Amino acid sequence: MSRIHARKFVSDDPDKCVGCSVCEYICSFEKEKTFNPLKSRIRVVRLDTTINMSVACRLCEDAPCVAACPRDALRQSEETGVIIVDEDKCNGCGWCIEACDYGAIMLHPDKKVVFICDTCDGKPKCVEWCPEEALSFITKDVLAQKSRISAVKKLFYEALKT
Amino acid sequence: MFGYAGRILRVNLSTGKTAIEPLKEEMAKKYIGGIGLGIRLLIDNSKPGIDPLSPENPLILTTGPFSGTVAPTGGNGHAFVAKSPLTNGVGEAKSHGFFGSELKRAGYDAVIFEGKAEKPVYVWIDDDSVQLMDAKHFMGKSPQETEDMIREELGDYYIRVASIGLAGEKLSRIACIINDKTRAAGRCGLGAVMGSKNLKAIAVRGTKNVDVAKPEEFLEFVRVLHERMKGPATVKYRTLGTPQNVLVHNSLGALPTRNFTNAIFEGAEKVSGEYLNERFVEKIVGCSSCAMRCEHITIVPEGPYKGTMARVEYEPLWALGPHCGVDRMDAIIKAIDLCNYYGIDAISAGVIVGFAMDCYEHGILTNDDTGGLDLKFGNADEMVKVVEMIGKREGLGDILAEGVKRAAEIIGKGAEKYANHIKGLEMTGYDIRGLKTAALGYAVSFRGADHNRHGAYALDISGKTNRFKFEKGRSKLVIEVEDLYTIIDSLIVCKFSRGVYYKGFDDLAQYYTLVTGIGVTAEELRRAGERISNLARLYNIREGFTRKDDHLPIKVMSTPIPDETVAKGQYVSQEELDFMLDDYYEHRGWTREGVPKLEKIKELGLEDLAYVVEGKI
């Protein structure tokens, strides 16, 4: 059973993200065979032009969305942490949408049930296509490692130059 | 149909009625979309000789066949087309961002806005639902404020908005239409057309699918384009951006300075792309579906304009900078921000400020006229103030907001000599006195002074042509690139991506076919470009244009470049221009007066417009 340390999810580096929404188009095509950002499992947010970031499911431990569902339509894969939606049980009530702190759950425009990033079975297409290489498929531990390294790099920026 | 939505929306602002018409495949194939489709709809939906600011002038909004797909740069474009209040001829302006793709998802290839609303309104297009909404409370607001307020009012934060600012409301002839906060359909004064209709904004939410004919092959092609976009063809846009031009043009003696008084600028270093990127650029962002991103967002770090944020490209930088003799980047950024805030074309605005400075230096404008502003070349803070006056139509700004041609006529006293425009549209940042291939492109451009209607400057700057001497037959090169640019603007792919279509029309034809399923060959697509170029010419002829409208600014034709530079002494004489035009008309299949001959009209399938040339050939 993979615990949270080993779970990989799609993470966006806002320093690199330019808000182009290629990830949305590619996701919608991969999952629904059409170009429609409203059918994407990853969504871009642009604030004040300079701040851009895509958001997808973070695969939380003890996911609040699962706990919030009154119909037991959501369950979390023990193996990958991915949230699995039982479309027969889901009636689109939106409790899970409210429970998600990241806005990573959406109501499907046609099917009227919720849909969530499933990491394309561990090979996320958005990561493959991101023109800026801003997206990565990564664990939280490795994210922390990367952050530490860039923080230290910044601290010793001058020293590294010489 | 694939790619296309197959529908044209008609909104009558006078009656509030809307109607939907089909976009027929034949029309799509002949005019492609974007400006091609827009100009065709303009000619079909307007009477000759109308006042551009009257309710009879339709404002046409189009998307391209790629809009709404992941086609890099092509997925996000839209165009506005109407009779231009600056030129009285074809007015067209494109913009990118996110608005065009939203409109396509709402299910429209084009929207025709007709008539005039009784009170200020905005049009709210929510898929199939189209409503006229009260815009009273948005009046006087900037496009950026309007965008936020509409989203708040309608309660959907992914609504996309194209709107005018105060300048458009006040019918400034250089008013533009802004979408996604920083993107402008800038040229030709189409914001004034929108304002004349009491149309403050267009808000769009589209939720429909956009499907392409051959999705797998299309994605393969897109993948190739993504790779190419990481390569040399787009490196300029991804790194220094278009402001890279400043030092290049300066070294060639092709950087118009102080209203085309000089062709080199002593302050060039301080307004260069290099300087800008090191000190001002905060982030480079992209439009929807783009794989190259170019938008250099700058923030002023200190001084009187501290905290000002604007997107900077070469043309506005040039117009408000070197063209006004201004070498202070903070003031240039502030002025660009003001142009966005009031909704005016930053190129035209800068050219007009430079014109006013030239008039001031020559005693044509005095302190009485300027309200005490010392309008000498190089006075950065004064430049910023004049931009604000133009935006608000205050004092001298009220006259200047009429565009440089009309402003010169109103001011009189020989001010015309300093008005740098072609057909009424203000010049752009290429000193064509020493760029003779470009000079022809500028003279014949159907929307007036513009580098983006032909791109012929590239031939001169790269050294492919002798830029100081125009020889017979060279028009062929201009026509080739002109028709390519017309197709680029009809597909609406971004011009910054032009270098990634390695095989030109072949690549674009393949692209078009994969998206739409409508098979076209490279030759057919080139032919469509030629058709649209001729269509635009026919529109202008219908509105009374003749050979004499294919002119160049008086300064370009009378004042040789005075500076110690390779281009010293260059200018374009009347004799030279006539030689160019004769050559160009001949290769176009037009008469010596520049009128398309009947056989050319027939060859292009424009027979129904033969009436335009009746009695003129």
Image (spheres, rainbow, N blue to C red):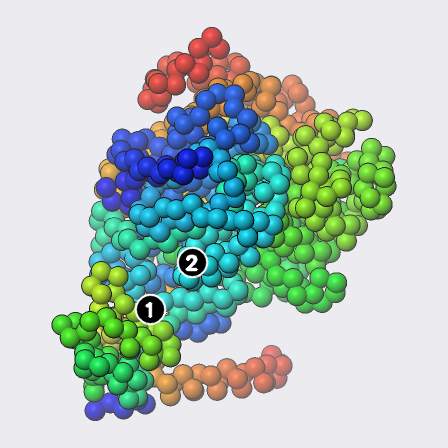
Residue at image mark 2: B154
Q: Is residue B247 left or right of residue A74?
A: right
Q: Is residue B531 left or right of residue B301?
A: left
Q: Which residue: 75% across, 40% down?
A: B396
Judged from the image, the secondary structure of the residue bearing numbered disc 1 is: loop
Judged from the image, the secondary structure of the residue bearing numbered disc 2 is: helix
Q: Position of residue A83 (x, y in %)?
A: 24, 79
- In this rendering, the count of numbered labels is 2
Q: Name the quadrant of the N terminus of chain A.
A: bottom left
Q: Residue B452 or B393: which is nearer the viewer?
A: B393
Q: Is residue B259 left or right of residue A40?
A: right
Can you say whether B291 is above or below B186 in the image?
A: below
Kind of residue sitting beneath label 1: Ile
Q: Position of residue B574 (x, y in %)?
A: 66, 20
Q: Which residue: 27% across, 35% down?
A: B22
Q: Are marks 1 and 2 on the same chain?
A: no
Residue at image mark 1: A42
Q: Chain of mark 1?
A: A
Query: Is residue B518 at least partly visible in the picture?
Result: yes
Quote the CA–CA distance across marks 1 and 2: 24 Å
Q: Which disc is residue B83 wearing?
A: none
Q: Name the quadrant of the C terminus of chain A.
A: bottom right
Kind of residue sitting beneath label 2: Leu
Q: Residue B468 or B139: which is nearer the viewer?
A: B139
Q: Residue B543 or A149: which is nearer the viewer?
A: B543
Query: Is residue B457 at least partly visible in the picture?
Result: no
Q: Position of residue A111 (x, y in %)?
A: 20, 63
